């Protein structure tokens, strides 16, 4: 496999609205990212992905872009972005932006011109259809609930397509003029010096035609059907993705990581690898393993064995082909420590366990802001505290299914995207050092005991442990094995044990006891060296006693 510049790195996602506010307006900004570059460098970060910070009405927190060329004044200016790129380069760090091109904002000039002149060239940038028998053109349900069709204001029977929020009209990728505009924008940013993109919701760009009258089987009592069925039916997305790769990413040697869900085994070589559309893609298999098409109320709990099996399956399918990007959380998911560790087991030791399991898999690890200090889900006391549009929709789904308001709140609390969007907890001062103003989203009240300043002073903290993990990945003694070595499961059928080898220049055995109770294991080979552990291992000859949530890395 050809080695690429990004494979030996560690990546970090920033949700700019909640990272660090330097203006005192309660909203994080680009200057705040610049201020914390040295902190990120010390953590061992090389690549920084920044969620959308372009001009936007923020109907979906920046994923509704009104101008792809302009930084939103709430976050700063284009000059601030250029300064960030420059300051990152001084530290041998790379900046990724979020490429949101399945849709734009209804406040983008393209859409305004399209609505103003339905027969003009800009109308072909979007999907407009006439209704059917007084109803929407088809029965697809949007990702945020309700129909994917919204009536064009001032018309009797004309609708536009939006797979997400009604303020996010879908772009028509079938139109070569639209694609040219997108490629021009991508190359403009790459020429500015960014290193690449995270590519949002990209499987949605290929539709099934005709749209009008193309119903799917109803799957809820709202009479609608999940729009994701379109993804499995649509054919030919590779034509678009290959063109984008060849016109933009390849000439710039840029890194691209796709948000790809529900891919088949046959599709993996198409998406990533030497000739893939992207450099890498995220591993959502563990989180998706508990989802239900019916809604969050029907979703299950990801058990320790489910998490392990999902990770192992991804490693088996992906490693012969290319590099996966590993995550335990991001801006769209709840906090990983609250999702993958049973509530009664949550502790600093368990958080370090989960960090080890992620960081030692083969692939490019992405750490989400606050993950490195073990930030947890927030406890909602009222639906009025919620900002996230998907949480609000799922709350209504729960009520329609007969759950009480208290039950519905508890259900959505577990999965809400707001869990990951509460401001970063920098210190124990007012508003956790995030802002001198009023935070746009309330802080998690536990910031006084979980914060960066406190953990920086503690060599046994979660933060200190993450620094050890990133340092291990870059350690010349183990780098070749940790980055490029094979991933081989060990005792994969043992209940609540997550253990595997990394085999390369050296052989590392990673042992993770995914439960509170201790267990004794027979080691398969003599131990040459204890590389790292989240506790004091108890090894006698070829026997090891693993305490609860122990994660130990051995060279054998």
Image (tube, rainbow, N blue to C red):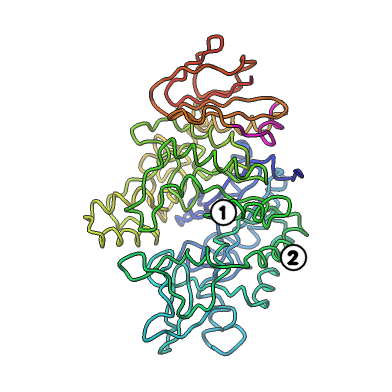
One can see residue 29 in this view: no
x 62%, y 85%: residue: 121
Which of the labelled discs sits on residue 303, or is there none? Answer: none
- The quarter of the picture where the C terminus appears is top right
What's the CA distance linking mark 2 and mark 1? 26 Å
Q: Secondary structure at mark 2?
A: helix
On screen, residue 339 versus residue 201, left or right, reads: left
- Residue closer to the observer: 282 or 410: 282
Which of the labelled discs sits on residue 247, or is there none? Answer: 2
**Label 2 Cα crowd, 10 Å radius (few <14 / some 14-19 / many 20+):** some
Picture layout, residue 341 above or below residue 27: above
Residue stretch rendered in magenta on the structure = 478-488
Of pointers 2 and 1, the one earlier in the residue sequence: 2
Residue 534 lies in magenta, yes or no? no
x 70%, y 70%: residue: 184
User: Residue reaching furthest top?
Assistant: 541
On screen, residue 5 versus residue 396, left or right, reads: right
* Displayed quadrant of residue 2: top right
Which of the labelled discs sits on residue 264, or is there none? Answer: 1
**How far from the left and from the top, in percent, is residue 9?**
67, 41
- Residue closer to the observer: 120 or 235: 235
**How far from the left and from the top, in percent, is residue 289?**
45, 47
- Residue closer to the observer: 139 or 477: 139
Picture layout, residue 459 above or below residue 211: above
- Residue closer to the observer: 3 or 87: 3
**How far from the left and from the top, in percent, is residue 337?**
43, 38
């Amino acid at each position: 496999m050809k080695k690429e510049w990004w494979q030996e790195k560690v990546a970090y996602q920033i949700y700019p609205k909640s990272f660090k506010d330097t203006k005192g307006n309660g909203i994080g900004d680009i200057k705040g990212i610049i201020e914390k570059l040295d902190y990120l460098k010390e953590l061992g970060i090389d690549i920084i992905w920044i969620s959308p910070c372009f001009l936007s009405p923020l109907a979906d927190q920046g994923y509704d872009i009104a101008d792809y060329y302009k930084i939103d004044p709430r976050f700063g200016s284009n000059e601030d972005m250029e300064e960030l790129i420059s300051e990152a380069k001084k530290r041998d760090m790379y900046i990724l932006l979020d490429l949101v091109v399945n849709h734009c904002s209804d406040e983008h000039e393209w859409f305004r011109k399209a609505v103003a002149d339905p027969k003009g060239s800009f109308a072909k940038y979007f999907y407009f259809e006439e209704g059917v028998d007084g109803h929407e053109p088809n029965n697809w349900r949007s990702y945020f609930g309700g129909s994917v069709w919204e009536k064009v204001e001032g018309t009797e029977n004309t609708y536009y397509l939006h797979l997400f929020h009604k303020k996010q009209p879908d772009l028509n990728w079938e139109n070569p003029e639209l694609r040219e505009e997108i490629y021009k924008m991508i190359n403009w940013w790459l020429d500015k010096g960014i290193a690449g993109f995270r590519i949002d919701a990209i499987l949605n760009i290929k539709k099934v035609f005709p749209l009008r009258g193309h119903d799917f089987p109803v799957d809820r009592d709202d009479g609608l059907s999940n729009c994701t069925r379109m993804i499995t039916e649509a054919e030919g997305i590779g034509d678009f993705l290959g063109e984008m790769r060849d016109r933009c990413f390849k000439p710039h040697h840029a890194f691209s990581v796709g948000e790809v869900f529900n891919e088949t085994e046959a599709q993996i070589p198409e998406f990533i690898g030497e000739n893939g559309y992207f450099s890498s893609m995220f591993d959502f298999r563990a989180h998706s393993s508990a989802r239900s098409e019916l809604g969050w109320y029907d979703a299950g709990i990801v058990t320790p064995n489910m998490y392990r099996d999902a990770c192992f399956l991804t490693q088996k399918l992906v490693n012969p082909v290319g590099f996966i990007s590993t995550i335990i959380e991001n801006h769209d998911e709840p906090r990983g420590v609250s999702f993958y560790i049973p509530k009664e087991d949550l502790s600093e030791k368990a958080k370090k366990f989960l960090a080890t399991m992620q960081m030692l898999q083969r692939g490019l690890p992405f750490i989400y802001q606050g993950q490195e200090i073990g930030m947890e889900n927030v406890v909602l006391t009222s639906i009025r505290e919620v900002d996230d549009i998907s949480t609000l929709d799922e709350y209504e789904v729960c009520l329609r299914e007969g759950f009480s308001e208290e039950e519905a709140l508890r259900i959505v609390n577990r999965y809400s995207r707001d869990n990951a969007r509460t401001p970063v907890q920098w210190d124990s001062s007012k508003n956790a050092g995030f802002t001198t103003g009023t935070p746009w989203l309330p802080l998690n009240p536990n910031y006084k005991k979980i914060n960066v300043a406190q953990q920086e002073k503690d060599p046994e903290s979660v933060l200190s442990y993450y620094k050890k993990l990133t340092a291990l990945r870059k350690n010349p003694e183990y780098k070749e094995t940790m980055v490029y070595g094979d991933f081989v499961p060990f005792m994969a059928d043992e209940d609540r044990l997550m253990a595997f080898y990394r085999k390369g220049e050296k052989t590392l055995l990673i042992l993770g006891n995914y439960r509170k109770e201790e267990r004794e294991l027979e080691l398969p080979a003599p131990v040459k060296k204890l590389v790292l552990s989240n506790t004091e291992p108890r090894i006698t000859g070829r026997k090891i006693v693993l305490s609860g949530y122990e994660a130990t890395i051995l060279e054998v």
